[in-house]
Image (tube, coloured by chain):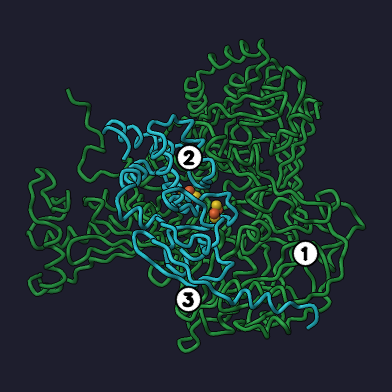
Chain colours: A green, B cyan
């Protein structure tokens, strides 16, 4: 007996299939083409002298000896670069009242964080450039620094933006419902203050750029390890005054990005400027220490939140204050307030309640900028919400699963609008909760926990439901005046040999963009996947688009490819119909052959159609112009975001003598709509979870009181290694979005979104017998011992 | 001009001639004393498959085989490798000794951006040449000097596990 046929049984059905990534073979052979590998003829190398002070006036710079060093071609200061680069300011119009200081590639007279690049040297090798840095003398005059959230809030302290009244970048408030009333009448109130350390992306390949300005062609070519080449094409064009069509940004293989490689960095702007000044290619790759002090950091929030419940355990209201410190200025062009904005809007998102009030205060301090990093705001919103839900459960004597079953929005209650204004099309919290319960063998874990506790072994079980923002529409940045595209484009051609080339604006950083696009194209056209070549990451070749950020590759890029392919298919069948004297609707394509739609009898290979159209158009009926290249753009409409959801669970053990936490197992039930390639989704989820577990347990950018980053190396800043990471069990529920034909939503941030919350709940569960609680992330051994009053 | 030690730059200028067998070929390079083996492989020899992630021995992206053993190319000066036999990801690929590992990594998508991957493969190759049937725990332990920031490590562990199984079923180590 054979199993019933599914859509995957049709030949060339690739959507939903775990096929390997074609481009991975190249990377496995060591043939990746990362920007850090690139060497161009006449290329020079840049290095930067960085400020040792967190806040200081620059009194004088003496670069005479550096310039005189053999092999040095240029020493440039802020003044030199300011002549050719216009300043940028990281604010968005719809964040009313937001301020941030204008930025230039290098500062003119003041440094605002320790590690800020001050002087650039370009030389024949990186080593010579670094030798020259040692010959530069800078006189600084120290200024008082703003080191943390509290000192940033204090009135009368040092100001980071001279001329402003305080160190507030942005304030915002949401108030929906009768919060005070709900708290006044609540049977139970739980309240907590949670703090979240600064983390950073630690992409394995540091930031890398090769800028090549050719004065004879007045053409700028930038090989840039970025996620968003079109955004940088626009920025380089506008800030250096070069027509957009003469700026080309090429982003080939990228060694990890996670949101970190889409912001404007001072050094990158400087390198572009240096290549313009010299008329030669200039390369700059940050070393690891530079990455730690100059890549964006993220998180750094302190959230006070309370939740009101009725006697039965229904959530009635939440009241939140989020304080977040973003560094000395806001990033460009996306700004540094997006994270806080998402925190206050995602808090409580999985739950059914009406009364919500939140205040957000975004503050400057003398540290490197923070900005969007994988799962922007999600881990904080999720940890705050899920911790309070667990505290409420404990107070009411309810099981964590029971209180969630009672309060999570019902799966049949959509569409829904959250108290913070997000519109949810369709989510599956209840189904995910049920599935997690079975998958974890929750009752078994609880029994084991109780048994082991008798012997002095303290295990904890934590769960955390989440909502993830994906497929952002123009409502995200477009309304704020940022030139960040929410549409994507594809150009798809049938080649003369009957194969397909697809140029697409979504980019590849290893998550498998090229693979899923070729799956979609092959599936929709009726070809074998190996006959589809996908090209990404070159603004001169691929059409303009938003590229890859905020989980839009599959949902938006995939839909673009799908629609483009359908248009090409129509065109191919029209030509085939002319040749075969048939109706196009009577034809289909299977395995590269035009067939009769009903009988699947082969009529003609599409390579033959291509041959005739390209080389023997004289044999086509008069007036026929074969359109075998189709260009198509797609922008999301309908819901402003395609929200996804899911739930994570974990089991861990706390060693109450050492404070060490051992992850035993992690679980996730995730709903990202239509899954295009389950194998890619699964490892993407695992990667996201591991990044989230790193944040939960190890990762923290630590600063001294003088504003120095004290753990800026991979020996001191701990990222998760294989030994500490658990096996991760995954299940999927598919609720496709009806806004697109493909139905796909994003999955890249789901793992990171709830991992900290899960671990936080599990550690608190493990510590329950000691009446000890943890309220900060990362949960380091020292913090555990402190909570246990053993340190 | 005072206080500047001119010899610093003279030292930097000086080069040494070193000779190795790299990926089966004899090569000679002029290297500065301060250049690491990693610099020499990537720059002078244009073998860019060996990656630099931390340049301090923490991340494992730069692992190569030196006289048959996995070493961090970032922790060794090129002059120290004079006379050594070095195999990089490019050579290991060409010779086919890790073809089964590469195929299994590919089949299971045990990589994303691929930046950690050459180092992972060199380390996995080393592990499997020493231990025929490592447990999953052994594999995780052996990989603990190889950071991967993209994957969840699990597919990597699965791939190495599967190759170990397949190799031992075929009757032992390669
Ligand atoms: S570059 Fe050698 S271990 Fe990281
Ligand atoms: S695949 Fe990107 S670091 Fe491992």
Residue B4 sits above or below residue A742 on the image: below
Q: Quadrant of the C terminus of chain A?
A: top right
Q: Which residue is mark 2?
A: B153
Pointer 1 local density, CA inside 10 Å: few below 14, some 14–19, many at least 20: some
Q: Which residue is mark 3?
A: A221
Check disc 2 and report its element: helix, strand or loop: loop
Check disc 1 and report its element: helix, strand or loop: loop
Horizontally, residue B150 falls left or right of residue A120, namely left
Residue at left 81%, top 49%? A149
Give the label, 3 or 2, closer to the camera.
Answer: 2
Q: Which residue is mark 1?
A: A52
Q: Quadrant of the N terminus of chain A?
A: top left
Horizontally, residue A234 falls left or right of residue A532, namely right
Please tell me if label 3 and label 1 are on a single chain: yes
Q: Nearer the viewer, residue A308 or A753?
A: A753
Q: Nearer the viewer, residue A370 or A382?
A: A370
User: In which image quadrant can residue A691 be found?
Assistant: top right
Chain name for mark 3: A
């Amino acid at each position: 007996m054979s199993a019933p046929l599914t859509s995957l049984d049709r030949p060339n059905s690739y959507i939903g299939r775990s096929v390997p990534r074609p481009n991975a073979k190249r990377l496995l052979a060591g043939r990746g083409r990362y920007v850090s590998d690139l060497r161009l003829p006449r290329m020079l190398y840049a290095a930067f002298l960085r400020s040792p002070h967190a806040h200081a006036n620059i009194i004088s710079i003496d670069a005479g000896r550096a310039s005189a060093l053999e092999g040095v071609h240029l020493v440039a200061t802020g003044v030199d670069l300011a002549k050719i680069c216009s300043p940028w300011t990281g604010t968005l119009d719809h964040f009313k009242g937001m301020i941030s200081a204008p930025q230039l590639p290098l500062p003119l007279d003041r440094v605002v964080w320790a590690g800020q690049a001050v002087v650039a040297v370009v030389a024949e090798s990186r080593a010579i450039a670094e030798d020259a840095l040692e010959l530069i003398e800078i006189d600084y005059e120290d200024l008082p620094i703003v080191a943390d959230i509290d000192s940033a809030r204090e009135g009368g302290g040092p100001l980071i933006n001279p001329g402003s009244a305080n160190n507030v970048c942005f304030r915002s408030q949401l108030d929906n419902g009768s919060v005070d009333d709900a708290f006044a009448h609540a049977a139970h109130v739980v309240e907590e203050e949670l703090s979240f350390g600064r983390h950073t992306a630690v992409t394995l390949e540091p930031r890398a750029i090769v800028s090549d300005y050719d004065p004879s062609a007045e053409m700028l070519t930038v090989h840039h390890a970025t996620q968003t080449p079109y955004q940088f094409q626009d920025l380089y064009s506008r800030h250096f005054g070069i027509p957009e069509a003469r700026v080309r940004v090429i982003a080939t293989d990228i060694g990890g990005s996670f949101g970190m490689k889409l912001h404007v960095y001072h050094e990158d702007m400087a390198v572009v400027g240096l290549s313009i000044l010299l008329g030669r290619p200039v390369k700059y790759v940050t070393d690891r220490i530079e990455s730690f002090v100059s890549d964006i950091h993220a998180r750094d929030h302190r959230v006070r939140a309370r939740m009101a419940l009725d006697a039965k355990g229904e959530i009635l209201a939440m009241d939140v204050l989020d304080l977040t410190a973003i560094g000395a200025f806001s990033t460009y062009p996306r700004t540094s307030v997006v994270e806080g904005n998402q925190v206050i809007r995602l808090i409580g998102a999985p739950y059914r309640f009406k009364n919500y009030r939140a205040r957000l205060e975004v503050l400057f301090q003398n540290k490197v900028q923070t900005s969007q990093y994988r799962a922007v705001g999600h881990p904080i919103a999720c940890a705050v919400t899920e911790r309070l839900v667990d505290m409420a459960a404990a107070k009411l004597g309810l099981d964590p699963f029971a209180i969630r079953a009672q309060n999570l929005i019902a799966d049949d209650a959509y569409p829904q609008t959250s108290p913070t204004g997000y519109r949810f099309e369709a989510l599956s919290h209840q189904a995910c909760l049920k599935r997690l319960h079975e998958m974890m063998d929750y009752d078994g874990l609880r029994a084991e926990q109780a048994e082991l506790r008798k012997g002095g072994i303290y295990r904890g079980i934590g769960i955390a439901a989440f909502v993830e923002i994906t497929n952002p529409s123009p409502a995200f940045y477009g309304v704020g005046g940022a030139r960040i595209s929410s549409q994507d484009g594809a150009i798809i051609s049938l080649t003369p040999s009957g194969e397909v080339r697809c140029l697409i604006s979504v980019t590849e950083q290893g998550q498998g963009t090229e693979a899923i696009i070729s799956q979609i194209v092959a599936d929709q056209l009726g070809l074998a996947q190996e006959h589809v070549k996908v090209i990404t990451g070159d603004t001169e070749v691929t059409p303009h688009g938003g590229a890859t950020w905020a989980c839009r590759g599959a949902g938006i890029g995939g839909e673009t490819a799908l629609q483009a392919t359908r248009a090409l298919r129509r065109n191919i069948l029209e030509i085939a119909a002319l040749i075969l004297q048939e109706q196009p609707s009577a034809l289909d394509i299977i395995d590269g052959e035009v067939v009769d739609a009903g009988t699947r009898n082969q009529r003609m290979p599409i390579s033959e159609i291509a041959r005739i159209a390209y080389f023997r158009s004289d044999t086509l009926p008069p007036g026929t112009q074969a359109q075998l290249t189709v260009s198509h753009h797609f922008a999301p409409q309908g819901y402003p975001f395609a929200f996804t959801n899911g739930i994570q669970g974990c089991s861990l053990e706390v060693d109450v003598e050492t404070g060490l936490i051992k992850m035993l197992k992690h679980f996730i039930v995730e709903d990202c709509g239509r899954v295009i390639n389950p194998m890619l989704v699964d490892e993407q989820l695992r990667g996201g979870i591991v990044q989230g577990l790193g944040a939960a347990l190890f990762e923290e950018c630590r600063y001294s009181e003088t504003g120095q980053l004290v753990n800026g190396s991979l020996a001191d800043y701990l990222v998760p290694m294989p030994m500490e990471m658990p096996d991760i069990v995954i299940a999927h529920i598919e609720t496709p979005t009806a806004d697109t034909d493909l139905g796909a939503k994003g999955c890249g941030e789901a793992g990171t979104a709830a991992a900290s919350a899960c671990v936080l709940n599990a550690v608190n569960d493990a510590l329950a017998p000691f009446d000890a609680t943890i309220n900060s992330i990362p949960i380091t051994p020292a913090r555990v011992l402190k909570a246990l009053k053993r340190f | 001009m005072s206080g500047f030690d001119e010899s610093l730059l003279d030292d930097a200028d000086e080069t040494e001639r070193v000779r190795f067998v790299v990926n089966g070929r004899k090569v000679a390079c002029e290297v500065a004393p301060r250049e690491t083996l990693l610099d020499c492989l990537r720059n002078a020899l244009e073998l860019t498959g060996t990656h630099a992630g931390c340049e301090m021995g923490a991340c494992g992206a730069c692992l190569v085989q030196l006289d048959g053993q996995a070493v961090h190319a970032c922790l060794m000066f090129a002059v120290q490798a004079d006379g050594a036999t070095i195999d990089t990801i490019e050579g290991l690929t060409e010779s086919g000794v890790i073809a089964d590992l590469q195929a299994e990594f590919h089949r299971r998508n045990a990589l994303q951006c691929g930046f950690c991957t050459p180092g992972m493969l060199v380390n996995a190759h080393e592990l499997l040449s020493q231990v025929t049937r490592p447990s999953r725990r052994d594999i995780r332990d052996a990989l603990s000097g190889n950071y991967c920031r993209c994957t969840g490590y699990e597919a990597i562990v699965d791939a190495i596990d599967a190759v170990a199984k397949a190799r031992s079923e075929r009757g032992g180590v390669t």
